Amino acid sequence: MSRAQEQPRAVVVGAGIGGLSTAVGLVRIGWRVTVLERAPELREAGAGISLLANALRSLDQLGVGEVVRSRSATMMPGGEGVRIPSGRRLMKPADPEFVRDHGLSVTVLPRPELHRALREALPPGCVRTGAEVTGIAQLPEGGAVLSYRDADSAAERTVRADVVVAADGKNSRSRRSLFPDAPEPVYSGHSVWRGIAEVSRAEEPGGTTWGNGLEFGRMPLVDGRGYWYAVTNAEAGTRRGDDHAEVLRRFGSWHAPIPELLRATPPEAVLYHDVFEFAEPLPSYVASSTALLGDAAHAMTTDLGQGACQAIEDAVVLCAALAVEKDVSAALASYDEQRRPRTRMIIEASRRIGRLKLREGKLGVLVRNAIMAATPPRAGERAMARIGDWYPPTLPGRVPA
Ligand SMILES: Cc1cc2nc3c(=O)[nH]c(=O)nc-3n(C[C@H](O)[C@H](O)[C@H](O)COP(=O)(O)OP(=O)(O)OC[C@H]3O[C@@H](n4cnc5c(N)ncnc54)[C@H](O)[C@@H]3O)c2cc1C
């Protein structure tokens, strides 16, 4: 399968962080790109997002690292370490020398700001909203034809592509049509509240607190506000009338500054989501001329804060492979080979730490705390380095950061 002599064309399904990152990379390597997004407008909901160094290096390759840094606060991975609800420390902060040697700092920003940075790096007209992809037909001669419903005209339309990037999220319709028998993401058993506290805390180091089947995390934002998340074991689909009241009830008596952060969060801005992950891996991230990317390929728990980071890594690896390999099949095979082992390792590591953090019952919590006390700090730091000390391939045509 060879690409036509003229400028090759990619269609990206979905304008989330994964789809937009890929579109930015494809434009950078000289492809024509159309992003089809089913939502009527481009708006990323969500509170904050943390990006470990692996993702920031990838954003540098896309040419948006500097703008993202300018909208972000930086913190040590894990902040001031792990505490229990009384405030007693369970785990020390990471060793600054180790963090420096492995370039492991964490960047935190409001999620809509990351989305905006990616959108602003795309040429006008590149993203079509109100365009829901309904089918992908692979062509025998290579490439594919996508069908989509255009909300403006209420018409069914088609578009041809040399490569399709299916970045349509954990419930990906593209994945189901390409791999009808493949496993689907399953509920992890954990759900998460998130919010941004309207405080002004210039010196917030960030940190996490582990309770009985509960976790609270807090991170600084560049303007002094505080991003927080709160994780619970729950039944899938649990819905409560007042999420703000619920987080206050569960976490409002924990150590400072947790109660202050919760009280300073506008109640209507508290989000609640069930978390899904691939318990079983997909057999492949590619089929013919289509590549699955981001949550569509490897939805994972939130416990390592790597879902979006891995989607951004995917984008750079895919674009670098397409830039180097003139044959689309070979480029997609290289993407698959590079991305499946790494994302699998991170899905499993994320699940393991999530299960440890959220142990419940008196005995469960005692055993967890004893494990943490007996674990040498270096072990956690090395585990973090396996993920964060990763360097993306170089994208040709990049604007120097
Ligand atoms: C509570 C929580 C906290 C998190 N915190 C972090 C964090 O701190 N750091 C981190 O790295 N990750 C984090 N993640 C994970 C991260 O949010 C996801 O991994 C990431 O957003 C996935 O991006 P995506 O582009 O693959 O998918 P999505 O963001 O789901 O985007 C998919 C897009 O495709 C569109 N779409 C779907 N179907 C179609 C269709 N048929 N046609 C056209 N468009 C379609 C959707 O409308 C959507 O815009 C968190 C997740 C949760 C739930």
Image: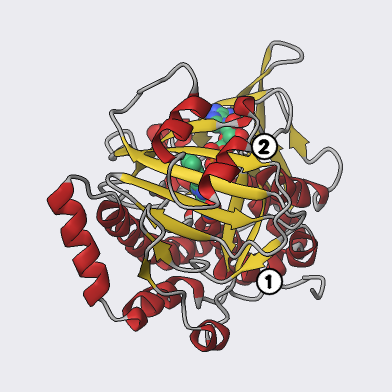
Q: Residue at x 35, y 39 (%)?
A: 232
Q: Is mark 2 within 8 Å of ligand 1?
A: yes
Q: Residue 395 carries which label?
A: 1
Q: Residue at x 49, y 26 (%)?
A: 245
User: Residue 322 location, x and y as percent?
Assistant: 61, 63
Is residue 296 among the parts visible in the rendering? no
Q: Residue 99 carries which label?
A: none
Drawn side of residue 114 relative to residue 295, left or right: right
Seen from the viewer's position, the closer of residues 307 and 229 is 229
Label 1 sits on a secondary structure element that is loop
Residue 294 to residue 233: above or below:
below
Q: Residue at x 70, y 10 (%)?
A: 154
Q: Which amino acid does label 1 sit on?
A: Leu
- The answer to which quarter of the image holds residue 394 is bottom right
User: Residue 267 location, x and y as percent?
Assistant: 60, 27
Pointer 1 or 2: first along the chain: 2
Drawn side of residue 270 relative to residue 199, left or right: left
Q: Which of marks 1 and 2 is in front?
A: 2
Q: Residue at x 72, y 28 (%)?
A: 129
Q: What residue type is labelled 2?
A: Glu
Q: Residue 44 carries which label?
A: 2
User: Residue 324 location, x and y as percent?
Assistant: 62, 72
Seen from the viewer's position, the closer of residues 146 and 297 is 297
User: Residue 226 location, x and y as percent?
Assistant: 64, 50
Q: How far apart are marks 1 and 2 (CA)?
A: 26 Å
